[in-house]
Image: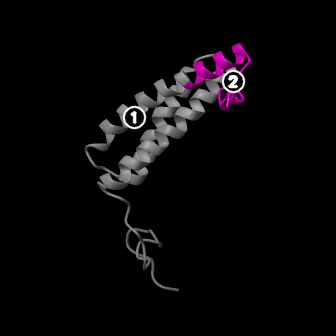
Amino acid sequence: MPPQPADGNPFAHQPGAVPPARGNLVLGLPAAVVAALVTAGLHGAVAGATEYGIGYAAAGVGFLVGFAVGKAGGADPVLPVASAVLSLGAVHLGRLVGIATTGADELGVSASRRPPSSPSTSAC
């Protein structure tokens, strides 16, 4: 058995270890956009199903967008500002989706499907 390193971490000197992402704007921004769109849809689905705006869900949107940006992009100084702006947009988009699903339920139509087109009546 090899000797233990001085710091006590037996996995510190493993070959092939990949360092964490640091300042990767190219990965961070797409991760923020994808996380914002996914959480906006989830927030809207919860708001539409419960017919209530839940504040903790909005905080969860911000947390998940920030978490995705931190994991993918690292410590780039632009990413916290971009994730905050995208989180606010995702919360508002989620509320709009919730309003649309609630309104569709009240009108008896589907919020996710396009209505069937009427048959064409051409006088040829």
Residue at (57, 34) in percent of width and height: 41
Position of residue 95 measured from the top left corner of the image (x, y, whole percent): 53, 22
Q: Nearer the viewer, residue 111 or 54?
A: 111
Residue at (58, 27) in percent of width and height: 44
Query: In which quadrant is the C terminus drawn?
Result: top right
Q: Which residue is mark 2?
A: 49
The amino acid on which the numbered mark 2 sits, given as a three-letter code, is Ala
Q: Earlier in the sequence, mark 2 or mark 1?
A: 2
Does residue 88 appear to the left or right of 37 in the view shown? left
Instruction: Say if the magenta span includes residue 2.
Output: no
Q: Check residue 12 in the rendering and tell me which mark sits there, or answer none.
A: none
Residue at (36, 59) in percent of width and height: 21
Up-down relation of residue 43 to residue 22 (above or below): above
Q: Which residue is mark 1?
A: 86
Q: How is the image coloured?
A: one colour
The amino acid on which the numbered mark 1 sits, given as a three-letter code, is Leu
Mark 2 to mark 1 CA distance (whole Å): 23 Å
Q: Nearer the viewer, residue 99 or 1?
A: 99
Does residue 119 appear to the left or right of 67 in the view shown? right
Q: Which residues are magenta?
A: 97-124
